[in-house]
Amino acid sequence: MKGKLLAFINRALPQGGVLEQTVKSGAWMGAMNVFSRGLQIILVIILANLLEPADFGLLGIALLVLSALQKFSELGLDSAVIQDASENVDEYMNTMWVLQLLRGSVLAGILLLGAPLVGSVFGEPRATGIVRAIAVAPILVAAKNPGVVYFKKKLNFHWEFAYQMSGSLTRFVVTIVWALVSPTVWALVAGLLASRAVRFAFSFIAHEYQPQLSFDIDRARELIQYGKWLTANSILFFLYSEGDDAVVGWLLSATALGFYQTAYRLSNAPATEITQVINSVTFSAFSALQEDSAAMREAYYKTLQLAAFVTFPAAFGIAGVADVFVKTFMGEQWVAMIPVMQILAVYGLLRSLGKTMGPVFKTLDRPDYITKMSALRVLLIAVLIIPVTNRFGIVGISLLIGAISLFPMFPLDAYLVIKSIDGSYRRFATELVHPLLASVGMFTAVTAVNRSLSVEAGVLKFAVLVTVGVVVYVCLALLLSTQFEWSIDENLRKVVGALG
């Protein structure tokens, strides 16, 4: 038994050629994100029955400020060393660590000093203490062992899995225990800080590199030079991905922000988790294929195909069962977020597909494409977001974000990636049409069953709807793959074969 277990673990380790390493790394990242997302959903469900929506909003305000500071000071250091063709980048590690420590210390100081201003701007004095408490978070993140970047660079995602899950499990346990003893927003704060502390400690256990306080100005210049476009894009990414949260918290209330952020977190599972796998794994894999344009083009189409195969049904499924899910697991006090969750599920789908393109742009040394598209998105949202929010609330702002992503952003992103890989519009569209048709059929079936069942929302009804959705999607996918030019079955067999 022990021998079989060791043999299984050995087969699962990312090794072999680029395809096998990429697939196995993707499996580890997928497992990590499934477990992490599962824990997060369970955590939200439990806390939704212990805390008030305003508690989620209060932490949301503090995390908005922290995220803004992080995004506006992003240096792109990890991406710079992952993209470097050299297998060993130890010469950059100490300089990278010092830069991270300086940045983390500055962010912590700003949070401590600016906490009262945050409470005043958002009209929530209770947020002041929370902002001060999370000031330690950027220091813990900055002080982690820089050697963990090798987990992604060398496609050692089994270690990345252990590193990330150590924090996720800690956050889950600490938050629930604290909330059971004292059901306040401080349970959320305690879980967050505990997860950062455990990841900091684990980083030095998991990798043998021992950083030192030494600094090389030339190495720092190289790292920052590569990351300049990523820094600009990070700022823009915050503005269009979290700027809406800031507007909701500022114009509406902490309760509205709690509804909006929770709906976003639950509905964007396809984008948040699947694209995290794609970005982490394919960037490393594309970097290894950057000299072979034909191989990279085919690798991108296969990546898009797999992403679409999973994200289309996930997004349509979330939209189809949102009302039953919220009423069953979260209670009547959360019903107001159901339409927001349904709309943002579609936005999550578009975001997921769009994120498959980022690794291509970065690998081909065109991170400026990401920045320019982000700038356009921010401009379009900025023009409309305040009047839409004032008039239509969180439902209106959800529609605005989704509509801009659908047009003009997705067509423009598609044009740029096809141009970059010298690809085909027909091939690109083919990889999207089939899962779209299967997902529409699935959504129609789930909606019809939901309306026809006479029972009220409950665990049984939710399970029935999920089962119907999975069965219908699989059947339609099999039909389309056998009757039309959709090679998803071949792609899946290769993935399974590489895992074996």
Image: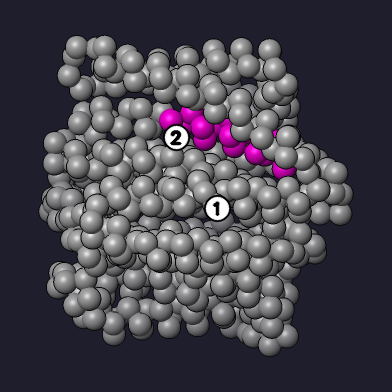
Q: Quadrant of residue 319?
A: top left
Where residue 152 appears, x then y in whole percent?
A: 64, 54
Mark 1, Cα crowd under 10 Å, few <14 / some 14-19 / many 20+, is: some
Front in this rendered view, residue 121 or 206: 121
Counting from the top left corner in percent of width and height, residue 70 is at 45, 71
Q: Which residue is mark 2?
A: 315
Q: Is residue 363 above or below residue 232?
A: above
At mark 2, the secondary structure is helix
Residue tagged 1: 409
Q: In the image, is residue 484 above or below residue 215?
A: above
Q: In the image, which is nearer the foreground, mark 1 or mark 2?
A: 1
Check disc 1 and give the amino acid type: Met
Classify residue 92 by image quadrant: bottom right
User: In this picture, is 139 found above or below 295?
Assistant: below
Is 20 in the magenta?
Answer: no
Q: Nearer the viewer, residue 428 or 150?
A: 428
The residue that appears at 54% across and 52% down in the rendered structure is 408
Span colored in magenta: 300-316
